[in-house]
Image (cartoon, rainbow, N blue to C red):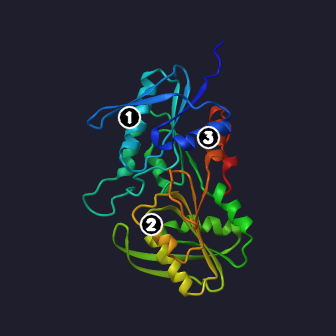
Amino acid sequence: MFGKAPMKLFACRSSKHLAQMIADKLGIELGKSSVTKFSDGEFQPCYDESVRGCMVFIVQSTNPPADNLFELLLMIDAAKRASAYKVIAVIPYYGFARQDRKDRPRVSIGSKLSADLLSTAGVDRIITMDLHADQIQGFFDVPVDHLFGSAIFAPYIENLNLDNLCVSAPDMGGSKRANAYSRHLQSEMVLCYKLRKKPNIVEEMSIIGEVEGRNVIIIDDMVDTAGTLCLAAEMMNERGATSIRAFATHPILSGNAVERINNSAIVELVVSDSVPISISSPKIKVLSIADIFAKTIEAVTTNQSISTNFVF
């Protein structure tokens, strides 16, 4: 009688730290792999141990540069060619997710293309967290386990014991996420409406709702340049908010984002370690998602439900 397929966990270069933490939570050794580099920039990943008949989990966020995505694709391909039983991509941050529709003529839908590339490489399952848009799950023809940052953020917010709590979204696209937090925390909700000149530049913003005398929690899936976030915080501060905190799962923090946050009305920005973050700031706090991913991986390998990992 054949036994159960053994499980092995590997990491691509960009997510090695998080992968090691997940392995520690699971009580296993992180799988051995290496990358051969060529002088022109080409690279070739390799498994340094057998994966034949194994359930292989590969941890890699696909934030830019595009090498991160391509390295994951090569690792998936290598595992399939090495006769792995199943290949599961653990993608804490699914990059190119802002390109989820044609919002103007003659543009690509990058998140769909990325999904197609992963499927073509041979992935059997995706585990990810806080997609920019929930409908991206439908771009895949394989099962997608979509986890939520609320599993770490909601308990943190509750432990703050803030009075007159108010939840906000920095734009209308985040209203569903903010509403879920608002219902769970039994608090009021306000929304921000913004108009953009072009990507990463906000032309105009207005706030819908009352923030005076309230402790505001701004919820978002990611913080990139922090322009929208800091503008929203400034307007709320001018309208008499008692304090303003922000929670964003994916800390992209490009350009002068950290400088903006340090000079803003935001008391604290709480993020996860879905992407590597080496920036030091007294206002930025990092909470690890290693535990929730470890529990999900364990549930997948034992065919158990993962719904217990969701706060709401």
The residue labelled by disc 2 is 257
Please name whichever residue, 300 or 63, is drawn nearer the observer in this view of the structure: 63
Classify 10 Å Cα crowding around label 1: few (below 14), some (14-19), many (20 and above). few
**Image x and y of residue 27, in percent:** 68, 33
Give the Cα distance between marks 2 and 1: 35 Å
Q: Amino acid at mark 3?
A: Ile
In this rendering, position of residue 216 left or right of residue 50: right
Q: Nearer the viewer, mark 2 or mark 1?
A: 2
Callout 3: SS:
helix
* Vertical relation: 110 (above or below) 119: below
Kindly identify which residue carries mark 1. Answer: 120
Q: Residue at x 56, y 74 (%)?
A: 266
Query: What quarter of the picture does the C terminus occupy?
Result: bottom right
Q: Earlier in the sequence, mark 2 or mark 3?
A: 3
Image location of residue 128, percent across then percent down: 53, 47
* Residue 40 in view (yes/no): yes
Which amino acid does the dot numbered 2 rest on?
Ala
Q: Residue at x 34, y 53 (%)?
A: 109
- Residue sitting at 39 percent across and 63 percent down? 255
Please indicate whether residue 65 sits to the left or right of residue 160 in the image.
left
Task: Give amino acid for label 1.
Answer: Thr
Q: Secondary structure at mark 1?
A: helix
Q: How packed is label 3: few (under 14 Cα within 10 Å), some, or many (20 or more)?
A: many
Q: Which residue is mark 3?
A: 22
Horizontal placement of 44 versus 300: left or right? left
Instruction: Return the disc, 2 or 1, that comes first in the chain's sequence.
Output: 1
- Residue 246 is marked as none
The Cα–Cα distance between marks 2 and 3, rounded to whole angstroms, is 28 Å
Q: Where, by quadrant of the figure, is residue 36 drawn?
A: top left
Give the mark toward the camera: 2 or 3.
2
**Residue 39 falls in which quadrant of the image?**
top left
